[in-house]
Image (spheres, helix red, strand yellow):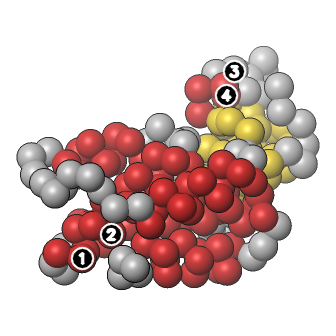
Amino acid sequence: MFQRGDHVVHHIHGAGTIVGLVHPDSAPKDCEYYELDLVASDTRLMVPVEGAEESLRPVSSSGTMDEALKAILQQLPNANVGRGRWRQRLRASLRTGQALAAAEVLQHLRARHQRRDLTRTDRRLLRKATAFLASEIAVVKKIPFEQAEYQVESLAMSCPS
């Protein structure tokens, strides 16, 4: 069970801080919710305590974050990136809520961008993956979200060395 002040990652919305436990008036008496203050937006999210382990996890270690950032820069071994149902695979990968999965999405989009301009759908997926990863980096490295976002964006769209 998480406590007030714990930093957690929601599998869809990214990193946040648990503000407390709430009992909404419209919910049954025995139903409690974690109230999260999300890093990437000015949004508060309510997550049912029962089943929270399916949608919340503790933030990753600093080493995992460094590994995720390095993964973005790696060249994909497969030259056929972007064939078939790749967008659906990337969206499903992003929904796992794992930092390395978000880095993989960014890695694929980076490779695609090196070959051609990204479509509007690609750019939307890029923004979502960037915000997800940057929110966790901001919490782990104790830096402002905007700084973490810039760091991720610059890696995701940089040219290979």
Q: Amino acid at mark 2?
A: Arg
For disc 4, the neighbor class at 10 Å (few under 14, some 14 to 19, many from 20) is some
User: Picture coordinates of residue 43 (x, y %)?
Assistant: 65, 62
| Callout 3–callout 4 Cβ contact below 8 Å | yes
Instruction: Farthest residue to the right: give it.
Output: 4
| Callout 1–callout 2 Cβ contact below 8 Å | yes
| Callout 1–callout 4 Cβ contact below 8 Å | no
Asked whether 75 or 128 is in front, the reply is: 75
Question: Which residue is labeled 2 in the image?
Answer: 110
Task: Measure the C-alpha gap from mark 4 to mark 2.
Answer: 33 Å
For image coordinates 69% across by 20% down, the residue present is 50
Question: Which residue is labeled 3 in the image?
Answer: 50
For image coordinates 48% across by 75% down, the residue present is 155
Question: Which residue is labeled 4 in the image?
Answer: 52
Is residue 91 placed above or below 134 in the rendered structure? above
- Number of the front mark, 4 or 2: 2
Secondary element under disc 2, as helix, strand or loop, is: helix
| Callout 3–callout 2 Cβ contact below 8 Å | no
Q: Amino acid at mark 4?
A: Ala
Which image quarter is the N terminus in? top right
For image coordinates 27% across by 67% down, the residue present is 111
Question: Which residue is labeled 1 in the image?
Answer: 114
Q: Left or right of 65: which side holds 113?
A: left
Task: Measure the C-alpha gap from mark 3 to mark 2.
Answer: 38 Å
Q: Earlier in the sequence, mark 1 or mark 4?
A: 4
Secondary element under disc 4, as helix, strand or loop, is: helix
User: Picture coordinates of residue 5 (x, y %)?
Assistant: 90, 48
Q: Earlier in the sequence, mark 3 or mark 2?
A: 3
